[in-house]
Image: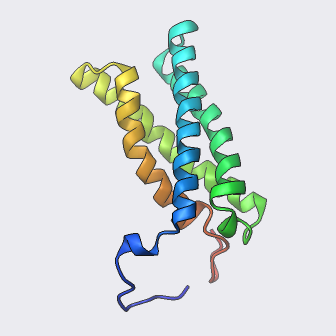
Amino acid sequence: MRLRLYYQGPFYARIDRGQAVAYVVSGALVTLSDYGSFTLCFSVFNAGLLTATVIAYVVGLVVSYVLNRYWVYRKGAENQSEATGIWRYGVFLAVNLAITYGGLWAMQQAFDISPYIGKIIINLFMFFWIYLGNEFWVFKGEREGPIQL
């Protein structure tokens, strides 16, 4: 791992614009699949909040993994094994599921915010959080050094 201790310019100047557009498009598709499946489970099938959230996450996970690995982050993902990508992605999504459910539960319990509105609020935060996690850990490629996470 190389440390760059000198100024590299503003963060926004280092962003790959093509990748950023692909991330926004894939994020919109993932959000639609997540929100749609959440609404279907919660409203049509009367699933509980936890069940609907988990099912929506699984649907979103599949759509997101395929789009991110093979389209958005393909440059970094080409340098790591499929097993590494799946393992990192699974760990990251478990953390994201806990954040999402915890946020939905807290908004519903403490502020009486509908899960439908809460889902939109959480998704706004998750949009940026997931970009950073995918860019700098999940699809970064193999790590250098003795520990290969």
Observer-nearest of 37 and 111: 37
Give above or below for 108 relative to 145: above
As rendered, which of 101 and 25 lies closer to the eye? 25
Label count reads 0
Residue 67 lies, in percent from the top left, at: 67, 48
Q: Based on the displayed image, in which of its 4 quarters is residue 83 positioned?
A: bottom right
Task: Decide: is 15 above or below 36.
Answer: below
> Considering the image in quadrants, where does the N terminus appear?
bottom right
Q: Looking at the rendering, which quadrant does residue 44 occupy?
A: top right
Residue 101 placement, left or right of 117:
right
**Residue 144 drawn at (x, y percent):** 63, 82
Whether residue 110 is situated above or below residue 40 in the rendered picture: below
Q: Can you name the residue that lies furthest to the left here? A: 111
Q: Which is more toward the observer, 132 or 25? A: 25
Residue that protrudes farthest toward the right in the picture: 82
Which residue is at 44% across, 47% downward? Answer: 127
- Percent across and percent down for residue 79 are 72, 72
Quadrant occupied by the C terminus: bottom right
